[in-house]
Image (cartoon, grey):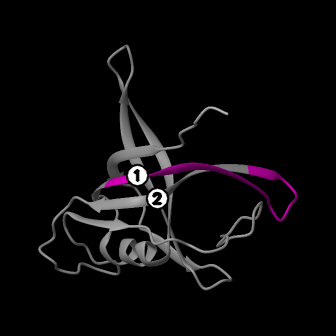
Amino acid sequence: MARTINRVELLGRVGTEPEMRYAPSGTAVTTFRVATDRRRQSGDVETDWHNVVCFAKQAEAVDTYVGKGDRIYVSGSLAQNSYETEDGQRRHRTEVHASEVVFLDSRNGERTGENGHAGAEAVQAAPVTGAPVAAGADPF
């Protein structure tokens, strides 16, 4: 079989405050959205929104140091999940599972609000053993 690649790189702005929760296994899981711009052939700029998920120590660092409006670099892999809502509707969600996150905005190490902020720091994902969230289930 030929080699395949599942890699995503985003450079954009955080559109929502990161939300950290814990999976039943105890692993920290942080989710947030990143906005990127795309130019159309007409010259118009269109904003795309990306759902990003971080795990373990990386999730804790993002929750602590990243806030809405911050510039951020994320690399990882694309994951497509589906789940069923309480009223029985099937939902699909495309996410970027981050393997590296670089905080690009500098706040001089000061904390500003519920989430603190730091500058130009890279956070690598730690290996996660087992699936932190049951397949096919909405973890949140």
Q: Residue at x 88, y 58 (%)?
A: 88
SS assignment for the magenta stretch, majority? strand
Residue at 24 percent across and 78 percent down: it is 112
Q: Secondary structure under badge 2?
A: strand
Task: Decide: is 140 above or below 93.
Answer: below
Point out the image quarter for the N terminus. top right
| Amino acid type shown at disc 2 | Ala
User: Is residue 75 within the magenta segment?
Assistant: yes
**What amino acid type should be assigned to the residue bearing mark 1?**
Ser
Q: Is residue 67 visible?
A: no
- Which residue reaches farthest top? 42
Crowd tier of the residue under label 1, counting other residues whose Cα lies within 10 Å: few below 14, some 14–19, many 20 or above: some
Residue 95 drawn at (x, y percent): 57, 52
Q: Which residue is mark 1?
A: 75
Residue 7 visible somewhere in the drawing? yes
Q: Which residue is mark 2?
A: 98
Disc 1 vs disc 2: Cβ atoms closer than 8 Å?
yes
Vertical placement of 57 versus 45: above or below? below
Q: Which residue lies most toward the left here?
A: 108
Does dot 1 land on a helix, a strand or a loop? strand
- Residue visible at 64% across and 73% down in the picture: 132
Q: Toward which corner of the image does residue 42 lie, by quadrant?
A: top left
Horizontal and vertical percent for residue 110? 17, 80
Query: Is residue 41 depicted above or below 74 in this figure?
Result: above
- The magenta region covers 73-91
